Amino acid sequence: MSTYREIIGKKIKKVSSDPSSGTEGEMWYNSTTGTLRGPAIIEAWASGSPLTTGRAQAGGNGTQDSALICGGYTTAVTAVTEEYNGSGWAAGGNLTTSRSSLRSAGTQTSAIAFGGYKPSPGYITVTESYNGTSWTNSPAIGTGRTGGAQAGTSTAALYAGGGTPGVVNNSEEYNGSSWSEGDNLNTARTVVGGSGIQTAALAAGGELGPPGYTGATELYDGTSWTTSPASLNVIKGGQGQNGTQTSSLAYGGYTGTAVTGATESYNGTTWTNLSPIALATPRNATQGAGADNGSAVCFGGDPQKSETEEFNSSTNVITAGAWASGPAMGTGRYLGGYGTNTPTTAAITFGGHSTTSTSLTETFDGSSWSEQPDMNTARSRIKGFGTQTAAAVMGGRQVGTPVNNMDDTEEYNGSSWTSVTNYPSDNRGIGGAGTQTAGLAIGATDPAIANVFDYDGTNWTAAEGNLNTARGYVSGWGTQTAAGAAGGSVSPNKQYEEYNGSSWTAKGSLLVSGDNISGSGSNPSAIFASGQSQPVGQAWDGTAWATSPNRGTGSVGGIFAAGIDSTSALVSGGYVYPSTGPTTASELFTGETTALNIKTFTTS
């Protein structure tokens, strides 16, 4: 009898505890549990970060960790392009021509988009090339149409079938400088899925026109199309599809009677329905990207969806980053408070207002909120800096009186508040960063100012550099010499700047604008929980802003936020819009985690 090592090529080891990593086929004997253990393949879809612009009928290409979406339909045809880095979406260069139902091929930094529909002039032949920054017009396709199968690269693309509006079987090839006619599909169809390269492509499913839908699969060898005996198990069109001619994944679509989330895998010979594995959100007119049938990111779809999902077939259990409900605060209010660059398990918030200003102080230990001694002066429209046991707050205003801005500064030592040296002027909406003995006060409003002040635990002095843009209600994080400041009261409320201790430098704008938004983290890693405009999450990795999972409590402004980087955060309280009042709700964010999927195997 052959040994396991002779059959698989791996030796079974004896260990006292399971390892944290492993590969398929590896096996070990756990002497503690007395069991034969090893990693097992798991296939699943998991929620991903949302698009900044929900849409359907878009173009898409790339890989799971480096995808591109362009154009599509929102409330009208759009030219918006977004890029995915494996964790979030960020704005790319806009198409030169707005359109829907287009197709795209290539990579995130070298793509081609072709065809589509625009109300005027209708079915278009426009082709554009993308270099990772901007789109430029390229030679047009011969027949303007929508919804054909896409395959290939930016210099060797294939476009087969589609609608004009009647379904067609036309096939065209692009060589980087011009389109030429290729062999026609055997079955004319539109909203057909496509994958592979120009000389080894696959077209599956689609709408036949009035007769209905098909699951038929055709294979292209660079010269001619051949109908495969394999057919999709779920007859549909409008699905997302990615991979190669021999390793493809198809998901979502429309069966003629219902939108589906069905997912199927192709191995070069047969399609396998992975049921019950399916998209959590069934969708039609969707797109996706991925290198093979073991990985994919699906994005967009009717009706104008922003949700994205990722598919993985691996020995790892991947848990997507997400917000979850946390313990409620004792008192709901439009909040001030400081939490940036502090752990979510040691947060402090203070002041704020509902109908009147308050001096309330509450702390969070990771599991519950506790009321602490009040500030000496009730106030709202404040932030601060420091830690749960060494915090400082400055300025603010009292609600319910004529405009009454304040210059009061107070310090907290973990058990009581003490009035200290006043802030240099009466003001509110001041952002904060740093510690109690090395703090930074950023901007202010009424009126908006660009002034920045240093605090050494005793005195306030003008910082070396002011903001480039005067604004208040800015959210700040980091230290006195390495800080970030974003958002604020000056339209379009997207400004983001970084400070090096002597000057501020404008960086990439927030994806979603908003006054009274809140963020947390350190410089250069931060997460914004957005605010009263919408619940869109945004993460900064030191280079660019990208989407992160949305909060669950919807449109809430004036929230408190805490966290040390873009992998964890706490948001609490605030005011629910439109005008439904203050909330005590809290949410906790946990970033994506990966763990080995270990199973016990029988020895019989």
Image: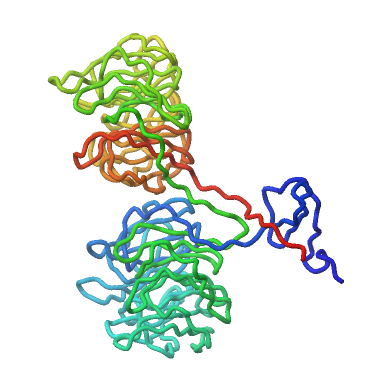
In the foreground, 30 or 148: 30
Identify the residue shown where x is 72% and y is 56%.
Answer: 37
Question: Where on the picture, by quarter, is residue 437?
Answer: top left
Q: Quadrant of the N terminus?
A: bottom right
Q: How is the image coloured?
A: rainbow
Which residue is most to the right? 1
Image label count: 0
In the foreground, 529 or 603: 603
Q: In the rendering, at what x and y percent does residue 308 appear? A: 41, 58
Question: Where on the picture, by quarter, is residue 299?
Answer: bottom left
In the foreground, 560 or 197: 560
Left or right for 142, reference 264: left
| Residue 110 sits above or below residue 587 on the image | below
Identify the residue shown where x is 37% and y is 67%.
Answer: 286
Left or right for 209, reference 366: left
In the foreground, 204 or 163: 204
Q: In the rendering, at what x and y percent does residue 552 appear? A: 35, 46
Which residue is most to the left? 402
Identify the residue shown where x is 35% and y is 59%.
Answer: 81
| Residue 529 sits above or below residue 92 on the image | above
Q: Quadrant of the C terminus?
A: bottom right
Left or right for 107, reference 127: right
Identify the residue shown where x is 27% and y is 82%.
Answer: 165
Q: In the rendering, at what x and y percent does residue 266 appear? A: 54, 76
Q: In the rendering, at what x and y percent does residue 52 appear? A: 34, 53
